Image (spheres, helix red, strand yellow):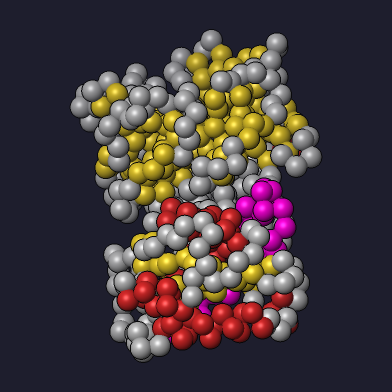
């Protein structure tokens, strides 16, 4: 779902008087509290200011003028930056609050490392500035039209701005400008990464299962239950066009997975002789990668470079995690057997950097989410309370979404693997089979 693109010529626009006044306001507030830029060498990415590894810079989000829509921008940005788990959000003003240099100075004295300020101009545009407290320099400037502030395009533009801010400050983009598919009540649903914007998606059949995103963010694949069987359907979310994957018109076909190139689609096809993994390459047809011999091979997950596929197989009776080359050769166990300490393994998902594979595995008969280090083959458990299954990676590579019953019903939760923080994403009950999208490319204009 490539929703839009950056408008041309932004860098040539003169700065508006309101923006210049805002800069003066912030610098006035920082006077006496800002220190010289830190030039101490730390490991990590250097982007004008550095922070010690393992620390999270504190940040305050404020609006310094009153204009329709500014509160919406502030609320979305604040939530996205908080959910990035890269910042400590220090102060949350009430809706309608307009702050001045004294208020900014108070949050600076309270420990804010950055101050993000919003100002609305007479042209119906929100201007966003992120100032660094220690150096007094501007880390990021952008503008967002304050039109249709309840619309999806507006929300995505603000989400993308949040990701840009995370990239400018810490060196890696966030995952706010993304969404998740999931199944609830036999239907496909989509929700933004902040838990808002829930909407139902039309599907070719009911129930619909195993949704998966294409790398372009515009197409999805899923299993559609129709009268003749359970085909794999590829659907364009913009045009609505649908394509049935050849050879899946009949029988059971599940767990589709797009390759990183977006041209190949792996899936599992089941017969009385077992279930095997196949790959569809568009015009070149379908090829078979596994030979079940009355075993089940399913849930393919591509490595980010497209060279390997992780999958689940029952060839050793209990479902376990395997890996093979993309052409089906060199099949081997990926996660070590633990001789009965845990049970069946399901739902592998390869991290965006290729270093980790997440999956769920039974512990005492209850599924829990695990993460495998691909190089060292070490495994660590991520969850423990309730039933937790079907992990899916955020595009930032540090967050996992999964289905959990930790509060008594099946909902989507998100875990930050670095801090251990958990947050609930949905409150619908009965959620299943989440799939996290790539980042969408609707952006705010840079100043």
Residue 197: name its quadrant.
Answer: top right
Q: Residue at x 60, y 66 (%)?
A: 66
Relative to 405, say whether 307 is above or below: below
Residue 241 pos. (x, y %): 78, 34
Looking at the image, can residue 324 be seen? no
Residue ID at (64%, 79%): 18
State which region is magenta.
136-159
Is the residue 217 above or below the residue 116 in the image? Answer: above
Q: Is residue 354 left or right of residue 284?
A: left
Answer with the quarter of the image where residue 251 lies: top right
Residue shown at 41% from the left, 49% from the top = 399
Residue 140 lies in the magenta stretch:
yes
- Say which residue appears at 42% left-offset and 73% top-offset: 103
Q: Position of residue 284 (x, y in %)?
A: 72, 37
Q: Is residue 151 left or right of residue 323?
A: right
124 falls in the magenta region:
no
* Quadrant in the rendering for residue 140: bottom right
183, above or below 180, in the image: above
In this rendering, the answer to whether 175 lies above or below 341 is below
Tell which of 246 and 191 is nearer to you.
Answer: 191
Q: Is there any visible trace of residue 139 in the rendered image?
A: yes
Of the pair 424 and 17, the residue shown nearer to us: 17
Image coordinates of residue 394 in percent, x first then y, are: 48, 48
Count of numbered circles in the view = 0
Q: Quadrant of the C terminus?
A: bottom right
Q: Nearer the viewer, residue 127 or 6?
A: 127
């Amino acid at each position: 779902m490539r929703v839009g693109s950056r408008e041309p010529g932004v860098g040539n626009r003169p700065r508006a008087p309101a923006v210049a006044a805002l800069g003066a306001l912030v610098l006035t507030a920082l006077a006496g509290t800002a220190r010289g830029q830190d030039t101490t060498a730390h490991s990590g990415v250097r982007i004008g200011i550095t922070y010690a590894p393992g620390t999270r810079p504190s940040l305050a989000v404020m609006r310094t003028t009153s204009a329709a829509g500014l509160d919406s921008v502030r609320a979305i940005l604040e939530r996205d930056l908080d959910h990035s788990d890269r910042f400590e959000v220090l102060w949350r003003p009430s809706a309608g609050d307009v702050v001045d240099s004294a208020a900014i100075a108070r949050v600076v004295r309270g420990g804010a490392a950055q101050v993000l300020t919003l100002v609305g101009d007479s042209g119906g545009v929100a201007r966003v500035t992120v100032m660094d407290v220690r150096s007094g320099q501007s880390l990021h400037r952008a503008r967002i039209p304050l039109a249709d502030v309840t619309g999806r395009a507006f929300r995505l533009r603000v989400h993308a701005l949040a990701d840009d801010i995370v990239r400018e400050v810490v060196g890696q983009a966030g995952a706010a400008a993304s969404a998740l598919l999931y199944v609830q009540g036999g239907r496909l649903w989509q929700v933004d990464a902040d838990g808002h914007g829930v909407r139902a998606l039309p599907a070719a059949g009911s129930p619909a299962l195993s949704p998966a995103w294409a790398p372009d963010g515009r197409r999805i694949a899923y299993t559609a239950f129709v009268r003749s069987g359970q085909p794999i359907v590829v659907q364009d979310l913009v045009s609505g066009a649908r394509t049935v994957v050849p050879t899946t018109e009949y029988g059971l076909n599940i767990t589709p997975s797009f390759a990183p190139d977006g041209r190949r689609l792996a899936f599992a096809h089941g017969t009385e002789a077992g279930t095997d993994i196949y790959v569809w390459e568009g015009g070149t047809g379908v090829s078979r990668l596994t030979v079940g011999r009355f075993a089940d091979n399913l849930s393919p997950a591509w490595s980010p470079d497209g060279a390997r596929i992780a999958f689940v197989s029952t060839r050793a009776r209990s479902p376990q995690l395997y890996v093979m080359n993309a052409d089906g050769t060199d099949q081997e166990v990926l996660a070590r057997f633990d001789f009965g300490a845990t049970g069946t393994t399901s739902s592998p998902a390869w991290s965006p950097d290729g270093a980790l594979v997440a999956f769920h595995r039974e512990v005492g008969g209850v599924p829990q989410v695990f993460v495998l280090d691909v190089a060292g083959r070490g495994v660590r458990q991520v969850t423990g309370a309730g039933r937790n299954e079907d992990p899916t990676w955020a595009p930032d590579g540090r967050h996992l979404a999964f289905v959990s019953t930790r509060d008594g019903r099946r909902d989507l939760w998100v875990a930050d693997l670095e801090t251990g923080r958990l947050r609930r994403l949905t409150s619908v009950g009965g959620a299943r089979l989440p799939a996290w999208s790539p980042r969408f490319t609707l952006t705010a204009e840079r100043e």
